[in-house]
Amino acid sequence: MTICAVCAGEARGFGYVHRLQHDRYPYHRFCSLRCQDVGSAIAQRNNGMIDKTAREAQAIRDARVLFAEALTDLGLMAPFFNRTAADIDRLIEAAVTGYVDSMLAQGARKERTGTAHDDPIPF
């Protein structure tokens, strides 16, 4: 499976090569047009490279502590104990991306009714 250069989801046919120079710059793959737009803008600012900013990387590292506390509170730490930092960071990035995508989608729709049980259970 090829992963998206922006959100680490599964890449689905979207791509970008800086200045269309395949011999000089890496080919970045994306899961959606939205990620492609974001990734290509980052690449254009950073001479063809897509990396996390220092603040993004630090925010993910800072979130590890709260993530570990939540896992411990829920009794789920054992399966995650021997995972690499990169694995944990990928989980954090996936959660943040899902949250942001949902908030953006909700912002584009009419507000729900406001009752306690007006949304479907996702499982």
Image: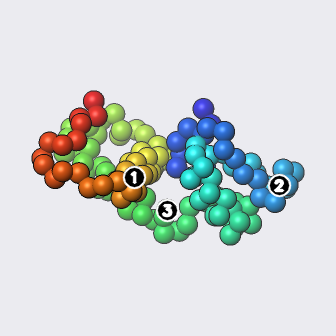
Residue at image position (26%, 55%) is 111
How far is mark 1 from mark 2, CA to CA?
32 Å
Do the residues bearing badges 3 and 1 touch, measured as CB atoms within 8 Å? Answer: no
Question: What type is the residue that disc 3 sits on?
Answer: Ala
As drawn, the label of residue 57 is 3
Q: Earlier in the sequence, mark 2 or mark 3?
A: 2
Image quarter hosting the C terminus = top left
Q: Nearer the viewer, mark 3 or mark 1?
A: 1
Image quarter hosting the N terminus = top right
Rate crowding at label 3 as few (under 14), some (14 to 19) or many (20 or more) other CA atoms within 10 Å: few
> Regarding mark 3 in the picture, which secondary structure is present there?
helix
Q: Quadrant of residue 42?
A: bottom right
Residue at image position (16%, 53%) is 114
As drawn, the label of residue 105 is 1
How far is mark 2 from mark 3, CA to CA?
28 Å
Question: What type is the residue that disc 1 sits on?
Answer: Ala
Percent x, y of residue 53: 55, 66
Q: Is residue 88 visible?
A: no
Q: In the displayed structure, would residue 119 be above or below residue 112?
A: above
Do the residues bearing badges 1 and 2 touch, measured as CB atoms within 8 Å? Answer: no
Residue most extreme to the top: 123
Q: Nearer the viewer, residue 111 or 31?
A: 111
Residue linked to disc 2: 20
Left or right, 122 with respect to 38, comes to left
Q: Nearer the viewer, residue 22 or 84?
A: 22
Residue most extreme to the left: 116
Question: What type is the residue that disc 2 sits on?
Answer: Leu
Q: Earlier in the sequence, mark 3 or mark 1?
A: 3
Q: Earlier in the sequence, mark 1 or mark 2?
A: 2
Residue most extreme to the front: 110
How far is mark 3 from mark 1, CA to CA?
25 Å
